[in-house]
Amino acid sequence: MVTPIFIVATALGVGFAIGVLNKFGRNFTGALVLAALSFMTFISFQWFYALTFNNLSEAYVFTGGFKPPFAINLLMGQYESIATLMINLIGFLGAVYLYKSLKERGSDAQVVYLILIMALNVLVMTRDIFNLFVFSEITSVAIAGLILLEKGTRSISAGFKYIIATSVISTIFLIGIVFAYFITGTLNIDDFIGISLSTYKGGTIVVFLIMISAVLELKPFPANGWGIDIYEASEAGFSAIISAATTTASLFVLYKIMAFAGAEWNYYIALIGMITFIGSNLLGLKQDNTRRMLGYSSIGQVGLLITILGFKDILGENAPFIFFGILISHYFAKAGLFWLSGIINASNLKAWSIIRKKPILLFLMGTFIFALIGFPPFPSFFAKWTLVMDLVKTGNIVWVIGILLGSLFEAIYLFRWFGYAIKGDAEKTEEYKIEFHKIIPVWIVALSLYVLGYFIAQYNEFTSVINFIPLAFVALIFAIDFMPVLIKNTIAIIGMIFYFYTIYPQLDNLRLIFEVIFLIGGILALIAGYLHKGKRIGFYPVALLMYAGLTGILEAKTTLEFFYGWELMTAGSYFLIIRGKRSMTHALSYMLFSLAGAYAILTAFGIASVGQSTWSLSIINNIQYIPLWAYSLLIIGFLTKTASIGLHIWLPGAHAEAESDVSPMVSAILLKAGVFGIVLTLIGMGAENNQYSELVYVLGWLGAITALIGNLAAVFQEDAKRLLAYSSIGQLGYIVFGFAMMTHLGWLAAFTYTINHFMYKSILFLTIGAVVLRVKTHNMYEMGGLIKKMPFAFIAVLISIIALSGVPPLSGFAGKWLLYNAVILKGWYLQGAIAFFSGIIAFLYLFKLISSIFLGQLKDNHRNVKEISIWFIIPIYILIVGLMIFAAKPELILQPLGTMISQYFPEGGLNWNGGMATTSIGYWHGTHIMIIVGIMFAILFSWLAFLSRKAQKVKQFNIVYSGERPFTPETTHVSYNIFAGYNKALGFLVLPWITDFWTLTTNIVHDISGFVRRIYSGNGQTYLTHIVLYVVVIYFVFFN
Amino acid sequence: MNIDFTKLFFTFLGLMIVLNWGLLMSAIMRKIGARVAGRYGIPWFQPWVDLIKNYAVRSQITHGIMFYLGPVFRLSGGVGLFLFMPILFGSNLWSNFSFQGDLILILYFQFFGMLGMALGAGEGGQPHSFIGISRGLSQFTTIEVPMTLAVISLAVQYHTLSISEIVAAQQGGIMNWTMFTNPFATAAAMLSLLGAFGHSPFDLVKAPNEIPIGPPTEYHGTFLGVLRTNAAILHVVETVLFMNLFFGGASNWFELIIKSFLIYFWSVFVGMVFPRFRIEQSVVWFLKVPLILGIIAILLL
Amino acid sequence: MLKNIIIAVILIVFAVLFFDLFMLYEARTGLTGIAQYYAQNGAKEVGAANLVTSIVVTYRGFDTLGEVTILFVAASIISFFLKLKENDESKNISSKDTTEILVTASNVLVPVIFLFGIYVFINGHLTPGGGFQGGAIIATGVALMILANPNIKINTQIIHWVESISGVGYVVVGIFGLILAGGFLDNKITGLGEFGALFSAGAIPIIYSFIGLKVGAEISNILNKYQKSQKND
Amino acid sequence: MINTEYFTLGHISLLLGFILIIVGFWGILTQKNIVKIILAFSIADAGINILIVSLGYVIGKTAPIIDGSVVQKAGIDVSDSIVDPVPQALVLTSIVIGFGVTALMLAYAMKLFTAKKTLHINKFNDLKW
């Protein structure tokens, strides 16, 4: 074992020696610095490994040959080893990244960099408070110098602000230190802990001074203008070091100081952190400069970490896991993002669209952003989960709300930025080249995030249950992303079939239904993907990511697994959605609603775990602490995914703009995840013995109104896919309504709708998508007469709209019939009437859909279009077969469904007598009706065909038209705004007031952000005033 | 399903009776209308003449397969409604196939013909068809609202969705009719009936003089014949539905004829008095008084 | 106006805070804590007559290493911060002629000042003074040279050599302490020698010499950079 | 209130230190010239150094250098006759650090002046919000 003092000795030895060795050139000194850093990394890694895996006990390093407190000592313990490893690793990678900048500035800059990293190590390890001061001064001075790596006035003024600010802070720190020495006669931190400094006479004020300066070093909001400037002004590679390494060290300093500050500080620390977290992320919203935005994000993340430190006693043994989980994610991700920002060199967020030229950079950027927000499989996911669980368990729900609010703010600007990168309008097309030494560190940190995510998950008992196999499959697909579609699609389909085959015996009937929808539906939608030529870069990994998440939800045995699957699904579907044209804003709002929903679910899981000894998903069946809130949160969370009214604004755009074979995935399949969640929640509420009738009553109304508004809005659409999207909202409204009834029949109806909606909405989206591919427009009024060109598509749409509208004899009627019976038996007449009203409204848009596209006048530019692709016809007709079987033999599906529902609602099911289903009020024989209608239809058709056998086929335009010939198909094809009268009568119901509401909310938040950030006037003196004012305020708050 | 040929025969017979009664009824109504307007009117056999003429037209044109399917769907809708409707109370032979499905089936089967017709007409590419259909569908959505409320009210009142049982519950005197036991539901339904029959003021679907005859503009010859046949059947079946639900049903053909005539006359009567609504007017109209009546019917349960 | 009030309030609150601290203070009549330990054992353990030196160089030697480092870092930063463009190197600094007295005095005094500085750091373990003080004194000499002749060419190579070698030497001595004695920067790598003699207190005179040279070199370096940067104008 | 009986040399220098710090802070917060701000910082720094030294003061004791002037107990135990040596060591460090930081600040000031030909701090607000 190499003693940790060699970290210092190496850095200083090399650093001092370079003054002579610089004769050998800057490359030589650069290599020397790298060698020193790698040796330092090796030392801390060696300690980390020994302390973690070989159960070595922590080691003190004594300097001067005397024992503390008489001499300065360093400690290398478990946490120190992690922190120093992190600092040295990022130091090394950063040096690789900055190699050229440092070289350009000469050996002096190289040395300063090396010494900075060394000083950060000492900050972590030292146990002497004055030594802490000395090395924090070294850090400050070194940072102030290295800011100058970036040339120009901006970096100089930022550096000056930084150095005067840190000087003031260290003045306060020093006063605290000397008085601490004066009252205790020692400078050793362990002594302070031993004698509990704060209980000394005057100890509180001394601790206050020390603590406040340690906090100020971490740039708390709002006394942090000087700190944000350096993120913006310094060279990207160095911002990464500040954000990753300096932060780690400063947090560690705070941690050490908190050890002797006394528990009464914990609350204030947590509060300071929380204000910083929320405040910084709020201000991040208004930023359009990348680095500055990342700076706000960094400070925000530090705020969160400070809060965690404040809660360390409450979090108990999970505290290190949470702290390091979030810290490591932040550290890698933020370093990676800063480095990327140096490679791309686009200061304005909108200019980031140039990153698209190198898709692999997008992958890296996405990795970092998702890691920052806390998506699986990154460490922050597990840490945030544990944090929220523990905070809720200990009754700190308000804090959880704060954390989630801050995270949401952060998500807004980070995903907005990501959206610009993926989909923004690329104005400039200037080439940029990626330097090898710059991209390598980025790759290393990105891959480390994945690897660490896996290992972190294994670390904890309750996180080790995660099933990583689907994710591994996604990784495999990602690895072969360079292959053509044919191969990837086949592998994906085979993989999903195989996975379905292995997984289905493990699932109960409820989950099996959803698994069929998710996986079989997914496979069918993937078949359409064969249409694509080329590589379709990036599609398969994200599609499979979504499916991995979806199946993860079903397999989940614990709340963590469920949430893990949920987040994977959100991530995958986000990417699927943003792949569409013009879907930047839609994907953003999808992500934000999903995240807000996910946070609601997370909080609810936390509440559910109060008083439980297990993490099993079944804890939601027996929530002991504020159950009504928990269930409400769960429902709200899941309603974001089912796009209930009020939470639906993301859906129309997202579905409409998605690619042709993606729309069915995100509509017919994805929305069902929300349905599954609602089912789970309602089962949790006790199904038949449900005590939350008010909640489900509200839910029922919500469902009915969603159905009405969704369908009504669909009527007024001109974009075919948008129409279908609104229709999905309406259909999901029925489903929610059905489940909310909490009766056997209600659930049966809802499940029938669920299955039906999956089938007919898949067919519709696939068909319309395929048509759109042929005619190159979404607008229905630009189509028309396509029945002649695409009879197969027409038949598919015809059958599915008959099913959707609920007209007998197809399967949609089963749902309507069940719903009627359920409504009447439940007594929800008015809600029921609204639901049925909206069901009839569906006719309007269905007619518009089919007639505008397939009937009427063929447009001149479509005279040569062909039938839709065979790769679409195959899955469409497989689904049609399914639909017809359901229609002809409904008992095949309804009977097992009934059996399954009987577990939860034993009473009031259907009675089956052969094919005849009866309830206490109604009856229905699906098969017979099908036969009767079929025979009748056949007879009448033959009759008419016989009578009209001599009818002569005429060409287009040969119509009754006052003896004139219509001029163009455009003027003759009645489609645009066809329901104008209806709009005049009922259009007021679908005025976009919900969108307006959300827009207003967004604007208000942004205005607040814009207003608050004016405190950052850019004036260094103002920042100093902020710092001292902050001290004053905390002084008053703490001492009242 | 065991095929009962006797029953099948009676079903066919019933269909014929209904068809002819429907034709006759339409002739009577037109005659009444003419007299009110001070004209002489048509002879009573005019509908038969028209029908035969239509079926006999020799030259026909078609716009495609869906153009055929439109009238077929339409007629299937009418015939299907007849098939699933118990015609006479207490008679197994005249109850058709009503034991395969209940009131909900009837309600939703109405859409079968409508939807098919809309699509068939659509293939013609005739702008007036589209206009007619869009008006028809718009109006239809709101017509159904009071009707739905009335049906729910009835189902709750009688605790069944079976039409036969609803009729059975109304036996034993005129005061047992739904008309008296649930007057608000009856009123709501009867107002929605006005829309369903499409007489003035709700005749903007076909809107003569405005968009020739709306959806079927492009249809002629046998196609038109089929549509006319359907219209006759449908009118009777719809009145029979109302009769069954609200006016005690009928235990013999005579009673059926009287009641269906009166119910049909109600819509003709209103049509004589009021001028045509515009679409937004009629949509809103159904969401006012009829809707309120329907809600009252529900709330009074 | 508001700003002034805020500043006034801030200063008042700080005054209150300091007053609290002031009230904590009561004059000591004896030593406590680690100071007492140093007073009792310092001479014995470290062997330096100047207790402050034994604390600075040995007990808290690690701090001192940091101190040296901070000067080194500051000097390095200033040297790349104020680095001149190639063509500026040869320019002359325009300034008024310095007085004869200053030039003469500097010629006489500079060697004496250097000597005095060396004396101060070599005797740092015995008398008041030490490496920092000595180094600072040496740098004063350099400052005087610059004042006397603003265009003087200071041999930066020597400064760098001195700085580097003394810096590395300091670290190496520290590592010897780790290997041969009780820990990094332990002075007992040689015998402690006779108390109060010049060659006593183990490695302290060596370390203090390194520090003195290094500090002198560093400060001179900074002065040199400031001097050169005047060529910019 | 302050008991004048115990108002020693230590008190006076301590008070002086505090006053200097406050003055320094006042200068930092109000002066617009960057060099003046740096000077103000130096004043505050000096105040702290005075503070540190004052805290090591022991009534009636001498400097912690073991020579003839100090009373030695057994051997070389001088704990009864010297002032606290630790603050003296600390103040040395503090001074050196203050020197380094001030030097760097001045370098910055020079560069800032070169950039904008002014030392008014309000002019250097390119980065904001």
Image (cartoon, grey):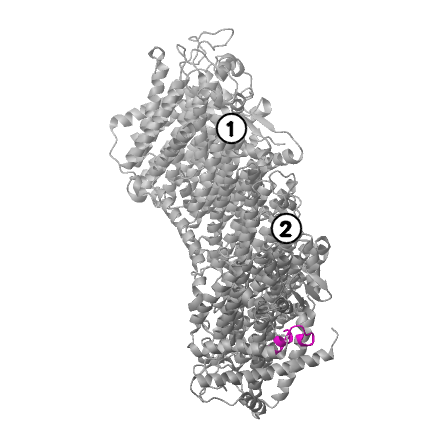
Which residue lies under the disc numbered 2?
Answer: A687
The kind of secondary structure element at disc 2 is: helix
Name the subunit of mark 1: A
Does A375 appear above or below B174?
above
Residue type at mark 1 is Ala
* Distance between mark 2 and mark 1 Cα atoms: 45 Å
Marks 2,1: beta carbons within 8 A: no
Which residue lies under the disc numbered 1?
Answer: A263
Q: Report the front residue among B219 and A65.
A: B219
Residue A593, x across and y down, in percent: 51, 53
Query: Which span of residues is magenta-colored?
Result: B78-96
Q: Report the front residue among C209 and A540.
A: A540
**Is residue C169 something that shows in the picture?**
no
Residue A671, x across and y down, in percent: 58, 58
Q: In which quarter of the image is residue A512?
A: bottom right
Q: Is residue B289 left or right of residue B116?
A: left
Q: Report the front residue among C7 and C72.
A: C7
Does A440 appear above or below B206?
above
Residue A489, x across and y down, in percent: 64, 63
Residue B140, x across and y down, in percent: 51, 71
Residue type at mark 2 is Ala
**Is residue B75 something that shows in the picture?**
yes
Circle 2 or circle 1, nearest the eye: 2
Does C134 appear above or below A80?
above
Q: Is residue A764 left or right of residue B293?
A: right
Q: Residue B250 carries which label?
A: none
Q: Is residue C175 left or right of residue A202?
A: right
Name the subunit of mark 2: A
Q: Report the front residue among C33 and B207.
A: B207
